[in-house]
Amino acid sequence: MDSDLVIDVRNMTKRFGGRTVVNAIDMRVKKGEIHGFLGPNGSGKTTFIRMLCGLLKPDAGEGTCLGYDVLRESAMIKRQVGYMTQRFSYYEDLTIEENLDFVARLYHLPNRRQAVAESIEKLGLSARKRQLAGQLSGGWKQRMALAACLIHQPKLLLLDEPTAGVDPKARRDFWEEIHDLAEQGLTFLITTHYMDEAERCHRLAYISYGDLLVTGNASDVIRHAGLTTWLVSGPELNTLARTLRELPGIEQAVAFGETLHVSGADADLIARSIAPFMREPYLWQQVNSGLEDVFIHLMGTSSDNFHS
């Protein structure tokens, strides 16, 4: 095994009944890396994370997490992983300090009070440590949850949509903290639906309905998609978008502020379809595809694996 790899798994698979929710996924994540894990709701991201940290047993697959076998040594993995769930999962009728003390007890930390105090100080929670968790804003709840994840000094953090419902400033502050921790050697696997957050990850993996479609840094992912994207401005863009979506080669015509992004995988076919509209009152410009264009494209190329 490469000693620099914190996650090194192959063929990870999970089925529920006759439905395969994670289909033979490989993943390698290096120490100190912020690895973004992207995909639509119900695509299998959370299930994969739960298999990594020993909360779910894979139906197939092998590999290591933090050097421990994911099948046989899940108890050892749990001790060195911090897992932040999609929903706030702490006691709202306890204070920040009391919640962190409870988590410290769960991990049987020898210097519990010191660990709690240091965690509060490190995450900037000192002024609010006696405030009830239920009275906190989304941003402060998120910060408390991160403190709870870090209190036992894990080597890997698994964060499942950690900034959902948090205001833009709190999201930016959170990501600054993530990058600071990564520089100190902590490794992250983070699910997110925000494309600006995806761009802040060192590497990305995109999963759709159980299948891993693409991996790499943001530039790799965009290049792999091979999309052609045009930006168009002018009047009555909603009407134009509806018309364009019916034409050959146009996979998406999506509003971006006061413009449309018109994208598809076949550059020549798009060019022929938009040619009749490339006149006044519209202004067209070919632009680089963005991650959001790519992910909408990827969603369109995969099929839902839900079977009732």
Image (spheres, rainbow, N blue to C red):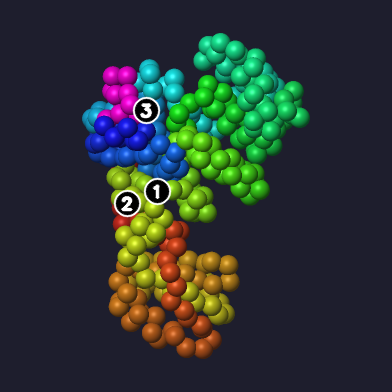
Q: 211 or 79: which is nearer to us?
A: 79
Q: Give the CA separation, mark 2 to mark 3.
A: 24 Å
Give the amino acid at mark 3: Leu
The quarter of the picture where residue 13 lies is: top left
Nearer-N-terminus badge (2/3)? 3
Number of the front mark, 2 or 3: 3
Mark seen at residue 204: 1
- Residue placed at 72% from the left, 25% from the top? 129
- Residue placed at 48% from the left, 34% from the top? 186
Q: Is residue 273 magenta?
A: no
Nearer-N-terminus badge (1/3)? 3
- Locate residue 76, reporting x and y percent: 38, 18
Disc 1 and disc 2 in contact, CB within 8 angstroms: yes
Query: Residue beneath label 2, please?
Result: 214
Q: Give the CA separation, mark 1 to mark 3.
A: 19 Å
Give the amino acid at mark 2: Val
Q: Is residue 68 magenta?
A: yes
Nearer-N-terminus badge (1/2)? 1
Q: Is residue 62 above or below residue 290?
A: above
Q: Give the CA separation, mark 1 to mark 2.
A: 8 Å
- Please state if 202 lies on the left or on the right of 170 as rendered: left
| SS for callout 1 | strand
- Residue placed at 64% from the left, 32% from the top? 123
Q: Is residue 113 above or below residue 308?
A: above
